[in-house]
Image (cartoon, rainbow, N blue to C red):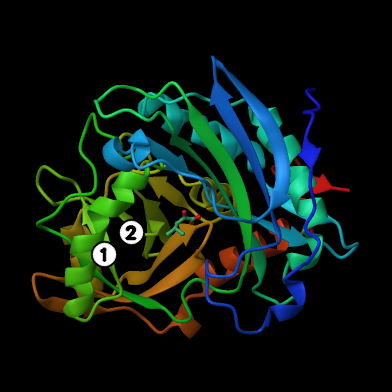
Amino acid sequence: MVKTKIKINKTKSSRLNDVNFDNIQFGRVFSDHMFVADYADGEWKNFEILPFQNLDYNPAFNSLHYGQSVFEGMKAHLDSDNNVVLFRPMDNFARLNRSCERLCMATIDPQIMLDGLSELVKIDKEWIPKTEEGALYIRPFIFATDQYIGVAPSETYKMVIFTCPVNKYYDTAVKVKVEDVYSRAASGGTGFAKAAGNYAASLLPAKIAKEEGYDQLIWTDSIEHKYIEESGTMNLMVIIDGKIITPPAGETILGGITRKSVIDIARDLGYPVEVRQISVDEVIEAQQNGTLEDMFGTGTAVTITHISGFGRSGVDYNLPPVSERKISSHLKNELEAIKRNKKDTYPEWLVIVK
Ligand code: COI
């Protein structure tokens, strides 16, 4: 096991006492420190934990122009012994590398990431909210730093991990619009990667949906706009007649770590799960014949978020009240308990930082 040599430079003036943990806007409050590294001459180096601060950037950084920039989202919680618990961190670092490979960027040894993150969360442990729905959101990312105007893979990169204390991402169930004009991803593209540009391309359609009274989108396949793919901030699952159905992650659908955890938890609890294509027509038909029991999103930031209703081509369809959604509420409670080390059902999913 690599034990990465990390230079540590702690802040002399913590901002912790300025934070009201009961009232934090998601992603707008940053913990005291960050872990950084540089890639040059074919290797990662300069591993350092330092006070959260601005980075130097050059206007010619090619990530700014050609989009070589990828990221991850993870969470840490405290367990009842006050240890920091990381949820499936190596899965996130493996996905970060898959994103890097697709964007022709330098990959990084997942053990280096885990060593750096473990040090970081130990140093900023007091930033982990103790509120019921709170967590320390972790944002690892890598971007190209060659200073060069020309479309070519960068030969230098920066890696940063910073963290944010957070509460819920969405306060209530969300109303979603089935998108049938714009596409998030196409076969052969970057849909499976957590590439910054994927999110940029989603902003205009999401803004239009907001203007029409929806909170988010449901993306559909780019060829026929017939099959459900994912939502802007989460993977999607529907429950029809007691069966949990979710489209297969793959080329155009992000391989969500919460998604695959929920599938395993649901199956182990005895709920039937079908991983298969599901058309918007099938969901509408189920809504109309009364067998559509639930629709929800899964993701690190959103955990499990209920969908209150959906719209297609200007027609809105309601879902049962959240209080009746027993299966997804059960799955959410299980997932949250596992992430806080309150259950020993999946010990291999947790890294306990002592
Ligand atoms: C996450 O769930 O971690 C994401 O990256 C989604 C983003 C909308 C916050």
Q: Amino acid at mark 2?
A: Gly
Q: Amino acid at mark 1?
A: Leu
Give me the residue at 71% from left, 57% from top: 338
**What's the distance in space between the residues labelled 2 and 1, CA to CA?**
6 Å
Residue 64 rendering spot, x and y as whole percentages: 33, 42
Residue 261 rendering spot, x and y as whole percentages: 57, 49
Viewer-side residue, 47 vs 92: 47
Residue 8 rendering spot, x and y as whole percentages: 80, 43
Q: Which residue is mark 1?
A: 217
Viewer-side residue, 250 vs 210: 210
Viewer-side residue, 102 vs 10: 10
Query: What is the crowding at mark 2: few (fewer than 14 residues within 10 Å), some, or many (at least 20)?
Result: many
Residue at the far top in the pictured view: 42
Give me the residue at 9% from left, 76% from top: 314
Screen quadrant of the N terminus: top right
The answer to whether mark 2 and mark 1 are in CB contact below 8 A is yes
Q: How many tags in the picture?
A: 2
Regarding residue 61, the answer to whether it shows in the image is: yes
Could you say whether the residue bearing mark 2 is in a helix, strand or loop?
loop
224 displayed left or right of 23: left
- Tell me the number on the disc at residue 116: none
Q: Which residue is mark 2?
A: 232
Query: What is the crowding at mark 1: few (fewer than 14 residues within 10 Å), some, or many (at least 20)?
Result: many
Give me the residue at 71% from left, 77% from top: 131
Could you say whether the residue bearing mark 1 is in a helix, strand or loop?
strand
Which quadrant of the view contains residue 143?
top left
Which quadrant of the view contains residue 136?
bottom right
Give me the residue at 29% from left, 22% from top: 152
Q: Earlier in the sequence, mark 2 or mark 1?
A: 1
222 displayed left or right of 157: left
Ligand 1 is within 8 Å of the C-beta of the residue at disc 2: yes
135 displayed left or right of 124: left
